[in-house]
Image: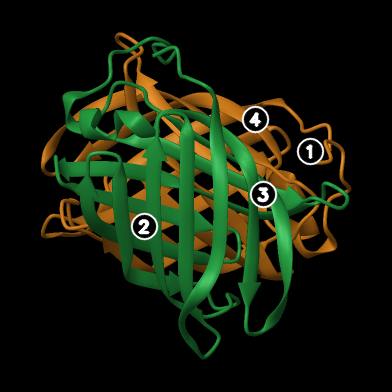
Chain colours: A green, B orange
Amino acid sequence: MTPVSAALHDGVAPLSFLLGRWAGEGEGSYPTIEPFRYGEEITLSHVGKPFLAYAQRSWSLDDGRPLHAETGYWRCPSPTRVELVVAHPTGVVEVSEGPLSTTSLVLSSTTMAGTGSAKEVTAVVRHITVEEDRLDYDLDMAAVGVSLTAHLRGVLHRVSTPSG
Amino acid sequence: MTPVSAALHDGVAPLSFLLGRWAGEGEGSYPTIEPFRYGEEITLSHVGKPFLAYAQRSWSLDDGRPLHAETGYWRCPSPTRVELVVAHPTGVVEVSEGPLSTTSLVLSSTTMAGTGSAKEVTAVVRHITVEEDRLDYDLDMAAVGVSLTAHLRGVLHRVSTPSG
């Protein structure tokens, strides 16, 4: 029932450089775990409303088993400001905000909260830069008593664009 | 790369009654808006890990235009306890928890938080009951200065089950 080719809402036009399906690889590390490499896919789509829908999943390069996933929405309250709300399957929710400059942005968490059984994550900072169909990101995290520390770094390529 | 037919993880076995794609209709009201009716689709799936992935969208019965959407994950820390983390495109995140009794459950928000541009939502309580392939729910909400008040009520039917 959802219109499949709604025009992009003006309210997220500054985020149009993020639209599409992205695939690539990344590497992760953290003081509490062994370094690891992963495959990753990210999808950013829209339905004509002032947000982008966001879904991410990653998998082991060894055997394809699912690793992380996250899902949420991107918003753009002004042409130089970006907002992200995300749910994590670890029982954590994240609210992040920050500056947007053409095709690069920084998102710093303003709220991290979790369910009773969730592992404690206290802060996340995401840097993202897009050049044409290449997306570079890194993610720093403070969790389980460790202060803000480099955790993930990846490079994705746009493999399709939305028809919308 | 994700295994398409992983076995359901024991850690979410008590939530297996929720798995599948559900479709139906609902009605909404709130002191600040006109009553409305909507079509709705919910999908609950798994990848063999201890959570269910959750996606919801609703649309106007008048013209099919998208109304609400939400996305997140369900967890089950014990056979009598359910947890939900959700991101809303309005810039809000929700952490909800509560008792699970066979095929009915109550989720009360423990955290509601939002981005700088989000409308203020302070509490959500969800009641869900499943009988075979019929799901009844209602949702109470406290928002924009209004205390906890009935907001949504819907009936969905399971239209497909996951192959996993």
How many C-alpha atoms fall within 10 Å of the one at disc 3: few (<14), some, or many (≥20)?
A: many
Taking depth in this image into account, of B131 and B152 the one nearest to the observer is B152
Q: Which residue is mark 1?
A: B1
Same chain for mark 3 and mark 2? The answer is: no
The answer to whether the residue labelled 3 contacts the one labelled 4, judged by CB atoms less than 8 Å apart, is: no
**Circle 4: is it few (<14), some (14-19), or many (20+) Cα within 10 Å?**
many
Alpha-carbon span between mark 3 and mark 4? 23 Å
| Residue A62 position in % (x across, y down) | 86, 53
Asked if B78 appears above or below A78 in the picture, the reply is below
Q: CA distance from mark 2 to mark 1?
A: 29 Å
Residue B93 numbered tag:
2
Element under label 1? Answer: loop
Disc 3 and disc 1: Cα gap in Å? 9 Å
| Amino acid type, callout 1 | Met
- Given the image, on which type of amino acid does mark 3 rest? Ser
Closer to us: A2 or B134: A2
Front residue of this view, candidates A144 and B49: A144
Tags 2 and 4 on a common chain: yes
Nearest to the eye among marks 4 and 1: give it: 1
Rendered image: mark on residue B21: 4
Marks 3 and 2, how far apart at CA: 22 Å
Dot 3: chain letter: A
Residue B156 in the image: above or below residue B142: above
